[in-house]
Each structure stands twice: as C-alpha cells, then as structure tokens.
Amino acid sequence: MSPFEFTGSQTVETHTGRLRRLLEAYSERYSACLDAFCDRANSTLDDLYAVFWEGGIIDRLSPENHEERVARRSLGKDVFEGDKDAPELFWRLLYVCAQVDHVGRSGIGERSTWFSRPVEFTVQKLLNVDHDLFDSLFGTEEDRKNPDEVLLQATRERAIRALELLGEIPHLEYLPIGARGQYAGIPVEIHGYTPDGLVVLHTQDKQDYATLINKNPRRSSAVVACDLDAAAFVG
C-alpha cells in the first residue's frame, strides 16, 4: 500500500507521520553525505561543491523516490515537478541564483529556499562536525569568505555546465530586471524572478497581459528563462 493511501483504521496523525518521515529522508541522506565529506582526508571546496550540488540541491528538489516527492508537495515543501535531468530544472536553478543575487543586492524580499535551506543546513553541519575543516575551506574570522556567496557562485556555474552538457545555450548573464523584449511576440519587460526560478514578465497593455497568460502553459506571467531570447532583450 502506498503511504498516501490509508485505511479507516489508520488515523490522520499516522498518515501525516508517514509523510513527515518521508520528508526527513532527505535530511538524513544529506547529513550522511556531509559526514562522509568531513571524514575524508584533504577535502576541498571543489569536493564540497559537488556534495552540495548533488546531495544538497538536486536530491532535495528531485529525489529518486516518487513518494518522497509527493510527500514534499503534500507538506508544501520545495520540490521540482519533473525529471532531475530535465533542462528546465537547471534553467530554474540558474534563475534561483538570479533571485538570490537580486535579494542580496536590493535588500528587498526573501532569498529562495531552493538555495537558502541547503546552504543553512551545510554551514551548520560543517560548523558542528568539524570547525577546523570549515575554517580551512572558508578562512578564519579575519579573512573568511562568505559561504553564501561562494556556494551561490558554485551553484550558478554548475547550472550553466549542466545546461551546456544537455545542448542548451544558458544565459551567461542574467536577464536583468527592467530589460525589454518579447515573449511569444508580445512586448514584455522583465519584472523580477520567483523563488522557484521563473522569470516574471510585465506588459504595458492589459490585452497583451491576457494574451501572455493564455500563451504561457503555466497560465501566469512567470516563464522559464529558456523561453526568452536573451539577445532580443535590452536593458
């Protein structure tokens, strides 16, 4: 029986408990990955980037276990509704980086939890398990690199690399907020980025906005960045 089907003898609390155990599976896996990283001799930042990307981000958003994905969705947690090798995942991670960067520069809004949650988990785990290793990776108090900035840059680079390996042409520069271009023949302006890596479009004309919504499969003004030709946008 699926954990999302329960008989009359099961309580709602039992069902919710099973969902939460599935939700916690990611944290247990990633914690084990970080333990193994700390236990290795001469672990480097490049090693950490690989662990963070695969175990911290990809496995969190798109776990192999379908029921775990359903549990995340049911409990309102971050999840990618697609295959873990789909180009859309990497396009959206690229623009999650844009969202995080914009929030950091502007001080407006909350950073995407697609990025911030695994960063917080990673930093706290390293500090708790091996403070000396943390210092060797990011420096001491006097010359410490900001782990957020370091991991953000690594995430951006890996998203670009993943897209290139899939034959995509990633935006090496983010489409900037305020840039003007077209989507499906409609004049639009980049209005912002969503926490789950979509690009929000704005139109001057109400009819154009209605057409935009109808042409976008998501029936919203937020689109995947690959649907926008970077060369056609001017800021």
Image (spheres, rainbow, N blue to C red):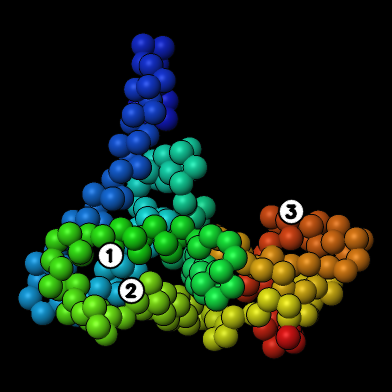
Give the percent coordinates (x, y) of residue 94.
51, 73
Q: Residue at x 74, y 60 (%)?
A: 221
Q: Can residue 119 be seen in the rendering of this structure?
A: yes
Give the percent coordinates (x, y) of residue 82.
50, 56
- What kind of element bears circle 2? helix
Give the percent coordinates (x, y) of residue 164.
47, 82
Q: Which mark is residue 89?
A: none
Who comes first in sequence, dot 1 or dot 3?
Answer: 1
> Viewer-proximal residue, 168 or 73?
73
For badge 1, the amino acid type reads Val
Q: Which residue is mark 3?
A: 219
Distance (Cα) linking label 1 and label 3: 38 Å
For badge 2, the amino acid type reads Pro
Who comes first in sequence, dot 2 or dot 3?
Answer: 2
> Viewer-proximal residue, 146 or 42?
146
Q: Which mark is residue 147?
A: 2
Q: Is residue 130 left or right of residue 188?
A: left
